[in-house]
Amino acid sequence: GNSNLTREVYWLLRGMEVQSCWLPEQRRRTLGFACRRRFDSLCEGSANDLIAMLSVAAITNFSKTSERENHEKELSSALQAAEDILEGVLQDEAMVPVLKGHLEANLLQYTVDVALADAKGDTVRVAADIVHCLEERCLSEGDHGGVVSTLADPKLYPEFLCIAFALLVKEDSSQHGRPMEFASCAFTVHGIHILMARLTQVLSCEGILCSSPGPLGASPSNQPSLSKKEYFSAMRLAFSKGLMRAFVSHGPSTAMKTGSKKRGGEVSMDEELELLLSPCI
């Protein structure tokens, strides 16, 4: 590639290759894997910028044409930067196998996929990619010690959920008045389950769950605003309606049929629904 980002990625990967393959272990610790930290930061920062832009585009009704055009330019620029970084990664045959389980690079890949699928109007692909970023999985032993986590950092959960929310609201509106037996949903039952699980976490962090009133000693000014509560309430309703449509169009998920814990640490559908339908939310 010709972009500065693609060239930067090339040299960062060269540094990572040298540090991991050629330097003595003591020297690796001394150098602190500076190239790896910069590469991680580059991928994560680009993914964060892109998903934030997509979230704003999904939930904002721009009152002026100029505002919409400016945002489209910023979104296009963020997407181009992300694609340049990925190009640098995918062109590097020596490092592609090494980066197969790389958290930040995979997050960037799926975020770009969300943007491209959204541009094509492929809502099923958008839904699948969002779920992939939000579902828990066991990370590689070498890089992350085998911990259970999501591709997306928890601080990005609201952005991914906003995109899913907008998609489901639009989907619900388009099917208004149609018999329920003909309903369809871009998300599977398992996908809605993942959205609801992450929404539960976000609500807890925002202090909206009764069982989690926010930071200890928080002043009234730090409590969630009424508009925020209403927004998340509308989101939860949209997810619930989506779950009904998903049952009709996809049938129960494997997790719902078995009631077993999913590999990677996800709680079962039964457990999640019990939590979500409790009166504390």
Image (tube, rainbow, N blue to C red):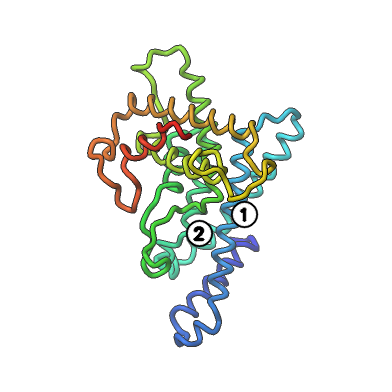
What residue sits 52% from the left and 40% below the top?
203
Name which quarter of the figure residue 268 lies in: top left
Describe residue 89's horizontal placement relative to residue 77 as left or right. Answer: left
Rendered view: 15 above or below 93: below
Task: Assign a secondary structure to mark 1.
Answer: helix
Describe residue 155's horizontal placement relative to residue 69 as left or right. Answer: left
Q: Which mark is residue 104?
A: 2
Determine which residue is flagged by label 1: 81
| Residue 132 drawn at (x, y percent) | 42, 47
Task: Assign a secondary structure to mark 2.
Answer: helix
Q: CA distance from mark 2 to mark 1?
A: 15 Å
What residue sits 50% from the left and 62% below the top?
89
| Residue 73 drawn at (x, y percent) | 69, 42
Rendered view: 81 above or below 222: below
Amino acid under disc 2 = Glu
- The quarter of the rendered structure image containing the N terminus is bottom right
What residue sits 45% from the left and 47% below the top?
134
| Label 1 neighbour load within 10 Å: few <14, some 14-19, many 20+ | many
What residue sits 62% from the left and 39% below the top?
224
Amino acid under disc 1 = Ala
